[in-house]
Amino acid sequence: MLFRNGSIVVLWLASGVFSALHAATAYVSNEKDNTVTLIDTERMEVTGTIDVGQRPRGIILSHDMKTLYICASDDDTVQIYDIEQQKFVGELPSGADPEQFALHPDNRHLYISNEDDNLVTVVDVVKRDVVAQIDVGVEPEGMAVSPDGRWAVNTSETTNMVHWIDAKTHELVDNTLVDQRPRHVEFEPDSKTLWASSEIGGTVSIIDTDSKLVRHKINFSIKGIHPDRVQPVGIKLGADGRYAYVALGPANHVAVVDRKSYEVVKYILVGRRVWHMAFTPDDRYLMTTNGVSGDVTVIDLAELKPIKSIKVGRYPWGIAVRP
């Protein structure tokens, strides 16, 4: 069955209509297809596809789970998709080449990294206007907001820094030097610690939020894989506080890291060129986007092993899961 609304085409598999509307759904941005794939996370099957803007990468849900935001990087916009209505309801003035973004706990202020302009753009998603633009380093990418709402943090790939932005004043107040080409940042739930991946440096830096200093650095080594191919990108922190999961790019593995000792306890083989990850709502599974192989790997977190590969579009990049 085919539904059309302007430029939007959603293809639902007949057997998956009810499941897609009522079960937990994963939304996967496909960078080279200009689409988002929908996956039923109970059956782990594709249920539909949404046509979106050009080169979709960052993709997140509003905190109330009603809205999906999509970075259409080559269209220089963030698209707003209403999940209940199953249609796009507007766009946000994102600045040039939006790549990653993060939503403040207030569910209103969206922080967007503009890779081409060396800026972070802050947008009010209710008024749909720009609140501030902050100069950061060269090629900004990673973006996170602390759970306590105090800090917005950005990474610059060429400057090799983590930039600390006061979320109240929207001023850049500090910088932390990390290893080469930082790609992603993730706060611990208590906001006291930040994880930052460095793709070319091959490390993850553990940064103290108060001092803004690196207090530990995690290295990775996989037997039979050249160190140059071990490139940390996406990071996810398990809800139970036990493990962190680090996507290692062209090494085609996810590292499982003990969050107390910062030791790697296991490497899990996934698809080719793993980018980003998301947990299912019950925290039973971790889903990874694998750019080169064009699929999503499903990892059983109790067993720490892959159990399924789901074919999606070309170059899947980001993923968000709605309960």
Image (spheres, rainbow, N blue to C red):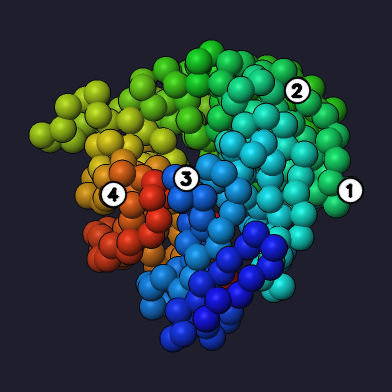
Q: Which residue is mark 4?
A: 293
- Vertical comparison of 267 with 199: above or below: below
Q: Which mark is residue 134?
A: 2
4 vs 2, front mark? 4
* Quarter that holds the C terminus: bottom right
Q: Which residue is mark 1?
A: 127
Cα distance between the residues tagged 4 and 1: 39 Å
* Earlier-in-chain disc, 3 versus 4: 3
Mark nearer the viewer, 4 or 1: 4
Amino acid on which the number 2 mark rests in the picture: Ile
Cα distance, mark 2 to mark 3? 26 Å
N-term-proximal mark, 1 vs 2: 1
Q: Nearer the viewer, residue 224 or 79?
A: 79
Secondary element at image label 2: strand
Count of numbered badges drawn on the protein: 4
Judge whether residue 214 can be spotted in this image: no
Which one is earlier in the sequence, the residue at label 2 or at label 3?
3
Which class describes the residues within 10 Å of circle 1: few (<14), some (14-19), or many (20+)?
A: few
Do the CB atoms of the residues marked 2 and 3 lie less than 8 Å apart? no
* Dot 1 and dot 3 residues touching (CB under 8 Å): no
Residue with the mark numbered 3: 31
The residue mark sitting in front, 2 or 3, is 3
Please tell me whether mark 1 or mark 2 is closer to you in this view.
Answer: 1
Amino acid type of the residue tagged 3 in the rendering = Glu
